[in-house]
Image (spheres, rainbow, N blue to C red):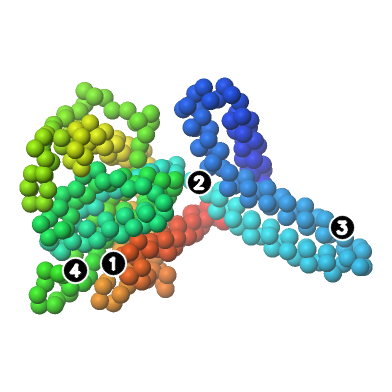
Amino acid sequence: MLDKLKTIADRYEALSSQLEDPATYGSPDLLRRLTREQKEIEPVVEAYRAYRRAEDDLASAQELLGDPELKEMAQEEMQAAKADMERLREELKLLLLPRDPNDSRSVVMEIRGGVGGEEAMLFASDLFRMYAMYVEGRGWKLEVVGRSETELGGLKEISFLVEGEGAWSRLKFESGTHRVQRVPETESSGRIQTSAATVAVLPEAEEVEFSIDPGDLKIDTFRSSGAGGQHINKTESAIRITHLPTGVVVECQDERSQYKNKDKAMKILRSKLYEAEQAKQNAAIAAQRRSQVGSGDRSERIRTYNFPQGRVTDHRLTGDVKNFSIDSVINGGLDPIIDALVTADQAARLAEAGE
């Protein structure tokens, strides 16, 4: 492991030298690529350097053992150094696990009301509010691309972009079917109903990574509309883009500007096609590996929001760590769930690596 860490540290120094070279700044793409690579390996290098300092501290303390006056202090320093080395060794094992190449990316999210009629649409709206509060708390940026509302304030579907460092690394665990159990606002008899909504999370693809042939696109314009089909714009500013080879269709009508709607729609389309290409490439690997936290497939039931019992249960987790306070979660307090899922994922990958 130490040889691998030294190689990474050497690479970090080489990147630093390249980034100090004025010629690098003449190529924005190269600068972006080098900066991203250095930032990705920086935590590993910092932990490795801390480990080497702990090694030096241990060696210095051992040299003092022969001095009777300093022996007690030396033993304390040795214990502290050994504890630091053990902690850093475990930290480095996690840092050396293969990274998801999309972890630093922004994401595209889609929420759709599922089984349960109007109550499912209202739950979809609650989920969007939950994610909006979570995004705000993380200091990220949320931008709605398109939405279809019901007359009661529910959401048939909504698409939005989340921009921020590490957005994918956290939100990728949200992909799947979310189930709710509660007495609906539309239920007069007080019966508890079970409804569902689906959440899809896609890594945003950069234009330089995934190009689309304009000849493969059919672009239609239409008037944007509000709840119940009511027209809210007299000009045809809404955009519908169809990718003819795959049949993927994306609509955007959230902006008054046709240009802005087209730009947003292209971002969504690019991300959908990028995800499809990645899924094709990773199919063999995914078939061999079944993580403890599930596949993230949108058809998989991942979480239940039980309002009468005041708890949220994540079905990918086990034991006491799978239940969380519904008041906290529904108001954007997702970090405890996501932290538990990250830990479970890391444990599964360490087990696979034989650590």
Distance from Cα at disc 2 to Cα at disc 3: 38 Å
Residue 214: image x %, image y %? Answer: 24, 24
Give me the residue at 48% from left, 46% from top: 99
Q: Quadrant of residue 15?
A: top right
Residue 166 against residue 76 in the figure, above or below: above
Give me the residue at 38% from left, 31% from top: 209
17 left or right of 26? right
The residue wearing badge 2 is 98
Q: Quadrant of residue 9?
A: top right
Q: Which amino acid type corresponds to the residue marked 3 in the rendered image?
A: Glu
The residue wearing badge 1 is 304
Q: Which amino acid type corresponds to the residue marked 4 in the rendered image?
A: Thr
The residue wearing badge 4 is 194
Q: Which amino acid type corresponds to the residue marked 1 in the rendered image?
A: Thr
Whether label 1 touches label 4, CB < 8 Å: no
The residue wearing badge 3 is 63
Task: Report if residue 261 is visible in the image.
Answer: yes
247 left or right of 347? left
Task: Report if residue 295 is visible in the image.
Answer: no
Residue 60 against residue 215 in the figure, above or below: below
